[in-house]
């Protein structure tokens, strides 16, 4: 009987060891799964914090929030496309004001002037062929404009002058007349 009891103990000890290993595996798996759920919860919370309210309003399930994120991404992509097309249109418009489709026409134009508002007053962009720049400055001074900044660049063998000017009396300044005078300037 003693022998039988020993065998029984041996058998019972072996399953206990297996049981401990199984329990450890289960505990490790449970801990890993718990960490994974916590990480996913923090990722979903981060996603929720990045989305505007109108895309997650009233949506509690994570699948609804992910759909809201997808909708928001689509919305942003559409906005980017719209803004890019507007930018391209503006580039084309500004290109038309300085360039003609026909190069001969471009070379025949003596001066080209664009006046637009900027933070300090107005910005004047000139493309002049044979006009001395001093006469441009004289016209600006006569109309009460004070040049604050100046940049010159070369485009297609032409000089493009960009001036930023402060306007002393904004209401009294006739920008159309200044633009016409600068366009008609000759040597």
Image (cartoon, grey):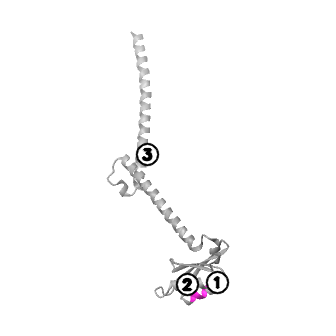
Q: Which residue is mark 1?
A: 133
In front of the other: 144 or 50: 144
Write the start and end of the magenta stretch as one range: 136-141
Residue 153 seen:
no
Of circles 2 and 1, the one toward us is: 2
> In the rendered view, would you say 24 is above or below 94?
above
Q: Main secondary structure of the magenta part?
A: helix
Q: Which residue is mark 3?
A: 39
Is 139 inside the magenta-drawn segment?
yes
In front of the other: 10 or 56: 56
**Residue most extreme to the bottom:** 142
Callout 3 secondary element: helix
Quadrant of the rendered structure where residue 132 is? bottom right
Callout 1 secondary element: helix
The first of marks 1 and 3 along the sequence is 3
In front of the other: 122 or 38: 122
Of circles 2 and 3, the one toward us is: 2
Q: Which residue is mark 2?
A: 180
User: Which quarter of the figure is the C terminus placed in?
Assistant: bottom right
Other-residue count near label 1 (Cα within 10 Å), few / some / many at <14 / 14–19 / ≥20? few
Of circles 1 and 3, the one toward us is: 1
Is 100 inside the magenta-drawn segment?
no
* Whole-percent x, y for residue 126 in the image: 59, 78
* Whole-percent x, y for residue 122 in the image: 52, 80
């Amino acid at each position: 009987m003693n022998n039988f009891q020993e065998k029984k103990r041996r058998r019972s000890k072996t399953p206990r060891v297996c049981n401990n290993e199984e329990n450890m595996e289960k505990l490790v798996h449970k801990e890993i799964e718990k960490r994974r759920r916590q990480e996913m919860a923090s990722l979903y919370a981060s996603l929720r914090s990045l989305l505007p309210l109108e895309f997650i309003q009233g949506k509690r399930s994570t699948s609804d929030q992910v759909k809201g994120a997808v909708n928001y991404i689509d919305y942003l992509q559409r906005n980017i496309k719209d803004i890019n097309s507007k930018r391209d249109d503006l580039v084309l418009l500004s290109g038309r004001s300085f360039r003609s489709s026909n190069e001969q026409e471009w070379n025949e134009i003596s001066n080209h002037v664009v006046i637009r508002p900027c933070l300090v007053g107005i910005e004047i962009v000139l493309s002049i062929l044979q006009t001395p720049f001093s006469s441009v400055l004289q016209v600006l001074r006569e109309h009460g404009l004070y040049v604050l900044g100046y940049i010159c660049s070369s485009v297609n063998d032409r000089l493009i002058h960009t001036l930023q000017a402060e306007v002393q009396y904004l209401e009294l300044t006739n920008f159309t007349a200044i633009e016409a005078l600068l366009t008609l300037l000759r040597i």
